[in-house]
Image (spheres, rainbow, N blue to C red):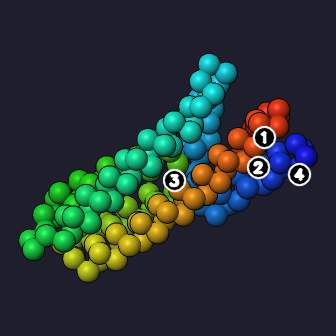
Amino acid sequence: MDLFQLQRRLVDYRASLYHEDFLDEQFSQLQDLQDENNPDFVVEVVTLFFEDSERLLNELAKALEQPIIDFKRVDAHVHQFKGSSSSIGAQRVQKACIAFRNYCEEQNVEGCLKCLQQLRHEYSLVKTKLESMFQLEQQILSAGGSIPM
């Protein structure tokens, strides 16, 4: 595949992420902060999001396995997850967190467990999509091209 085709594929792929609500305008703003002085800014921020998300998902699973669930603690983890997903523009993850917080307020164990599954699913999807996008960007750079904005 030549360089132009790779760049076209990246542009189309990125557009699909917005169209399918995986990403929102916040991700574009994050990309705007990247420049020659910090060419890996977006990858670094998103990698921190991945690490934080894995930790939060584990914390949530542990908290929901307790015989007596501390819904305030569960809600605090979900709130943190919502904030970090919002800061990178992971829209579907953020929406899953909003639903999750409603079940925390109601102290609905079943609802919280379902939301944890949904949150894991949405997080896994956006992680895979972003990793694919970063690999495509890397292919373009390795071929001597530049990343189209």
Label 4: element kind: loop
The mark nearer the N terminus, 4 or 3, is 4
| Distance of label 2 from label 1 (alpha carbons) | 9 Å
Judged from this view, the residue extending furthest toward the bottom is 110
* Disc 2 residue type (three-letter): Leu
Q: Which residue is mark 3?
A: 90
The mark nearer the N terminus, 2 or 4, is 4
The mark nearer the N terminus, 4 or 1, is 4
Label 3: element kind: loop
Q: Nearer the viewer, mark 3 or mark 1?
A: 1
Label 2: element kind: helix
| Distance of label 4 from label 1 (alpha carbons) | 10 Å
* Disc 3 residue type (three-letter): Ala
Q: Which residue is mark 4?
A: 1
Q: Which residue is mark 2?
A: 10
Disc 2, disc 1: CB below 8 Å? yes
**Residue at the (37%, 54%) spot, across then down:** 54
